[in-house]
Image: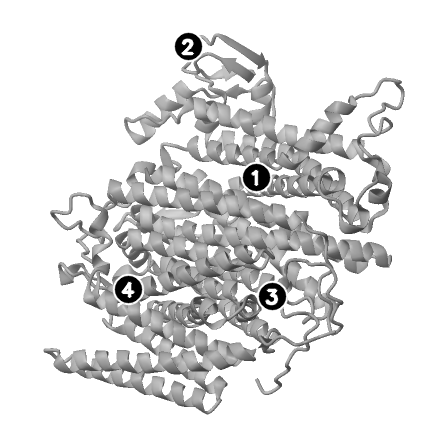
Amino acid sequence: MTRLQFAVVTIYHYLFVPLSISLASLTAGLQTASVLTRDPARAQRLRRSTLLVGKLLLVTFAVGVVTGLVQEFQFGMGWSAFARFYGDVFGPTLAIEGMLAFFLEATFLGLWFFGWDRLPRLVHLATIWVVAVGTLISAYVILGANSFMQHPVAYGLDPVTGRAQLTSFAELMTNPVLFATFPHTIAGAAMLGGALLLSIGSWRRWIGPAPAGAAGSPQARAVDPDQRAFAGLARLGAWTTVAGGLATALTGDVLGKVMTSVQPMKMAAAEALYTTTTGAPFSLLTIGSLDGSRPVFSVELPYLLSFLATGDFGSTVQGIDDLQAQYTATYGPGDYVPVIPLAYWSFRAMITIGLLAALVAGVYLWLTRSGLDPREPRASALPFMSQRLFPRPLVQLSLRMLPTLPLLPAAAGTAGWVFTETARQPWLAFGLTLTKDGVSPGLTAGEAWLSLAAFTAVYGVLAVVWLRLVKHLVAQDLADPPVRSAPPASAGGDGEGASETSPAAPRAVVPSY
Amino acid sequence: MDLVTVWFALVVLCWVLFFTLEGFDFGVGVLTPLIGRDEHERGAALKTIGPFWDGNEVWLVAAVGVTYAAFPAWYAALLSGTYLPMVGVLLLLAGRGVALEFRAKHSDPVWRRRCEVVLAVCSAGVVALWGALLSVFVRGLALGADGEVVAQPGLASGLSRTVAPLLTPEAAFGAVAGLVLSVLLGAAFLALRTTGPVRVRAHRVAAGASAAVVGLGAVVAVVGLTGADAVSVSLVALGALVAGAAVVVALAVRLGREGSAFTVASLLVAGVVVAVLLANGDVVLPSTLDPAASLTREGAAATPAALQLITAFGAVAVPGVVVYQVWSYWVFRRRVTSERVATS
C-alpha cells in the first residue's frame, strides 16, 4: 500500500522534475543566444521564445515543488523505520539538497521571472543559469541518495544501535551507480523537454492557430516572425530530443554494465534469464510465460546480452536461479527474485519507446531541413530517387499527432523508473534492508488508503489543470518580456494582465522603504 | 555549545523563518479575495508575494530536511505520528502554490476567480492546520517505547490515530491563533508593499487583526493565571507580551509607520514559534503516555559524524541563502500600485 503510494507520487514527481531540469537549461540557452546574437530581429524572436519557455518552466516548476515537498515528507510519514535506520545517510543528503540547490532554484526563478525590468541584462541572464545549475545539483544529490539504495556505499553499521552511519559523503557522491545514472537521467530529461518544445513549436508552426499577423496563406505564415520563432523552437526541440536520445542510449549502455556488476539480479530479471549462460542472447520479444518454462514464441539476438552486460560477446551472465541460490546462502532463506514480467517488459518499453521518440524527432529534422514545409513533396523526396519517402497523408497525420510526442519520453522515463525501482525488490537498500521492514510500524491500512486516494485525486486534477494551462500558454501570441527602465507599449495580451503592474502605469517609487 | 545545540538552534531558525516569511504570504493569500475589490487590485495584492513565496516555502523544506538530517528520530516520530494531518498540509500547500502560480497565466476572469478562491481557502486551511500542529509540538504524541505513535484502543478504523491529537482545545486554539496571526502579518505586509486602495484596506484589516491578537494573548494569560502549577508564570508573561506586541502593531499602523508595524508583527510571530519550540526545554517531542518515551534532543540526534558533515555544508550554504534571499527582497523593494491610473 505505502509502496504503491510512494510509487504513484514518485512517478508523478519524476514526470515534472525532468521537465523542469531540461526546460531550465533550454530557457537559459535561449536567453543566452538572444543576448549574444547581433541580429535585432533574431534577438527579439529568441527573447520571445525565452519568455514562452520560461513560463512553461514556471508552471512545471510549481508542480515539481509541491510534489517534491510530498517526497520529503513521505520518508517520515510512510517509512519512519527506514528514516530512523538510514537517517544518517538520507537526512544529510536531503538537507544538503535543500540548502545547496533548492533554495537557489526557488529564489532565483522568482528573481528571473519578475526581474526582467528590474535587473541589469547580464545579471538577469545569470539568474536563469543559476536556476539551471541548481536543478542539476539537485538531480545529482537526489540520485546520489537513490544510488545508495541500489548500491550502498560509504556506510558503516553502528554496532550498538544497528543503524547505518555515513562514513564519507564524498564516497556517497562518487557511487559508480550514480556516475552512470546521472547522465542517463539528464539525457532522458533532455528528451522530454526537447519533445515538449518540438510538439509546441510544430503545432503552432503547422497546425495550430496562426498568430494575428499571419492568418491565412501559408506564404504569410512562412515570413511571420512568430512563426519563425515557433519553427526554431520545434527544431531546437527536435535536436535536443535526438541528442538526448543518443546520450540516453550510450549512458544506458554504461549503466547496464554497472548494474550487471552491482545488481546482477536486476539484469537477469530484465532479461528473464533463469540459468547462467555464456554468450547469452538478448531477448527482443517473448510471447508466453516468463516463468522459465519454454516460451511460446521468442525472438532473441544471440550473444548480445553478454555484450550489453559486460562488453564481451563471449562472457557469462548470471541467471536468476543461481543468484537466488547465492542470496539464500548469503542473507538467509527468502525470496530474492523481483517480479520478472514487470522488470522484463518495463525494460523493453523503456528502450523501444525512447528510441521511437528520438526517431520521430530525427525524421522531423530531416523533413524540415533548410526551412522546408514537411508537407511539400520536396521535403520527403530522397536525393537519388524519384519516389517520395513519406506519402503526404502520412506526413499530415504525423504532424497532427506530433503534439502528443512528449508522451513517449514520459512513458519511457516512467518505464525506466518502474524498472529500476521494482527490479531492486525485495530490497529497499540492496543487500541491507527489505522493503517490508522500512514501513512506518504504526501506519494503519485506513490511513494508507485514504492518503493514497487523496494524493491520486489531487494529482489527477493537477495534471489536468497543468495540461490546460500549457495549452493555453502555447495558443497565445508570443509577447516581449518587459524591458528595464523603458516600459514597453502594452501590445499583445500576453495573459499577464493584472498580476503585473499595468506596464503603462507609472510606478510609485518610495525611496524610504 | 555542542553540535546538537547548534543544530537544534538551526532547526528553530528554519521553523521561525518559515512561519514568519510564509506566514505573511499565507496571510496575503487569505486576504486577497477580501481586500481586492476587483481583479486588478487582487492581482496587485498577489504581485507583492509573487517573487517570494517559492523562496519562503523552501524554508519549510529546509526545516524538515534539517530536522531529518540532525534529528532523524524526531523527524520519523513527528511525521509518521501526524500522518493524516501532514497529508492535509501537503495537499493544501499544493493547491495553494499551484493556484498562485497558475492564476496569472490565464486571462479568463472565471479562471482567475477560481484560482483566487482556491488560494484563499488553501492558505487559510494550511495556516489553521499548522497552528493546530504546533500545539502537538507542545503537547506531544502518544509515543511508545519504539518512538512510534501507539494507536488508541477502541478506534477500529485506525483513521483517528493521527487525527486525534488535533482534536483538543489546545489544537483548536492553535488553529485560530495561526489564522489570526497570519492575517495580521499579511495585512501588515500588504500595507507596506502596496499603494492605493489595497493599502488603505490593509490598514483596517491590520487594526482588526491586532485587536484579535490582543484577545488571544489575553486568553493565554488567563489560562496561565487559572492554571494549577508553576508553568503559569511563563504563560502569563507570554500572553502579556503577545498582547503588548499586538498593541504596538496597531499603534504603528495607526501612525502610518508601516515598516515598524510589519517588523513588530514578524517579531511577534517569531517569538511565538520560538516559545512553542522551547516550551518543553530539552524534550523535542513529549510522549503523552510515558515520560520516559519522550524524545530529547540528544536522544533524537544523528550521529556526530553526520552532524559534522552537515555542519560543513550548512556553514557555507545557510549564509549564502540568507544573502541572496535578502538580495531578492531588495530587488523587489518597490511598492506595487493598486490604483488604476488613467493612461492614454
Can residue A152 be seen here?
A: no
N-term-proximal mark, 3 vs 2: 2
The amino acid sitting under disc 1 is Ala
Q: Chain of mark 1?
A: A
Tell me the chain of label 2: A
Secondary structure beneath disc 3?
Answer: helix
- Give the residue type at disc 4: Ala
Q: Mark 3 highlights which residue?
A: A498
Name which residue lies at 57% across and 39% down: A180
Quick one: which residue is furthest to the bottom in this view?
B255
Of callouts 1 and 2, which one flags the residue occurring earlier in the amino acid sequence? 1
- In the picture of the structure, the residue carrying the numbered disc 4 is B132
Q: Secondary structure at mark 1?
A: helix
User: Could you tell which of marks 3 and 1 lies nearer the N-terminus?
Assistant: 1
Q: Could you classify mark 1 by the number of other residues whose Cα lies within 10 Å: few (under 14), some (14-19), or many (20 or more)?
A: many
Residue bearing mark 1: A180
Q: CA distance from mark 1 to mark 2?
A: 34 Å
Q: What residue did someone put label 2 on? A: A293
- Could you tell me which chain the residue with mark 4 belongs to? B
Against A85, residue B327 (above or below) is below
Q: Nearer the viewer, mark 2 or mark 4?
A: 4
Measured Cα–Cα span from mark 3 to mark 2:
66 Å
Q: Are marks 4 and 3 in contact (CB under 8 Å)?
A: no
Q: Position of residue A3 (x, y in %)?
A: 36, 38
- Is label 2 in contact with label 4 (beta carbons under 8 Å)? no
Q: Position of residue A360 (x, y in %)?
A: 69, 30
Task: Tell me if mark 2 has few (under 14), some (14-19) or many (20+) residues whose alpha carbon lies within 10 angstroms of its own.
Answer: few
In terms of depth relative to the viewer, which is nearer, A329 or A409? A409
The amino acid sitting under disc 2 is: Ser
Q: CA distance from mark 4 to mark 3?
A: 35 Å
Quadrant the N terminus of chain A occupies: top left
